Image (tube, rainbow, N blue to C red):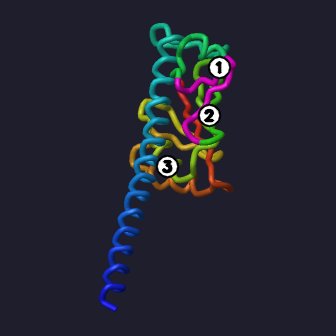
Amino acid sequence: MDRIISQFIVAAAVLFALVGVLWGGWEVEHKSTAGQAASDQGQISQNIQTLYKIGTAGNYSNISNATAINGGAIPQSMLNGDGSTIVGPWPNSRVTISSIDSGTGFQSAWTGVAAKDCATFARSQTAVGGVEVNGTTISLTDVGTDLSSQISNACAAATSSTATVTFLYTD
């Protein structure tokens, strides 16, 4: 009987260790996906502003995925080779670059953002005029507002396991 209990304890310890390793791996992947997306978005916005902004104003009226890709503004790891598709790090995630405010600004619309990463990713960019999460526009420059709660609530409004996060850049 003691031998059976001893084997059971060893098996339980091994199982517990395996669950810990798997959980830790999931957490690392979860954090690295949101972190990678945040880094990619930072590079995209900086590269686009470098390409399109002259002095204090930019003219983004003709910006698109294809022009951003052709201008070298998109990280290589986000390209699928067709010249117009920009992929995110989540399964079936896509990014669409387009003009806003009659060409005085641009946006990066990310679809297929994992719901668990939505709030972290939406809050990751500081040099942005605003962010739209699942259709709710949130100004990141409103001092005194609870931006984290606004973003979290907008992320929670997703009707599926994915969210849409759009970063808005205006001059």
Residue 125 in the image: state x and y as whole percent: 44, 35
Q: Residues within 10 Å of mark 3 (few under 14, many from 20)?
A: many
Query: Please, what secondary structure does the residue beneath circle 3 have?
Result: helix
The type of residue carrying mark 2 is Ala
The type of residue carrying mark 1 is Gly
Camera-near label (1 vs 2) is: 1
Residue with the mark numbered 1: 81
Residue at 45% in and 53% down: 26
Query: Please, what secondary structure does the residue beneath circle 2 have?
Result: strand
Question: Which picture quadrant has residue 8?
Answer: bottom left
Q: Is residue 100 visible?
A: no
Residue at 63% in and 43% down: 112
Residue 107 in the image: state x and y as whole percent: 59, 28
In magenta, the rendered stretch is: 77-90
Whichever of labels 1 and 3 marks the residue nearer the N terminus, that label is 1
What is the number of the mark on residue 148?
none
Residue 71 in the image: state x and y as whole percent: 57, 10
Residue at 54% in and 25% down: 170
Q: CA distance from mark 1 to mark 2?
A: 20 Å
Residue with the mark numbered 3: 119
Q: Nearer the viewer, residue 120 or 83?
A: 83
Q: Nearer the viewer, residue 27 or 6?
A: 6
Residue with the mark numbered 2: 109
Residue 156 counted in the magenta span: no
The type of residue carrying mark 3 is Ala
Q: Is residue 116 above or below residue 42?
A: below
Q: CA distance from mark 2 to mark 3?
A: 15 Å
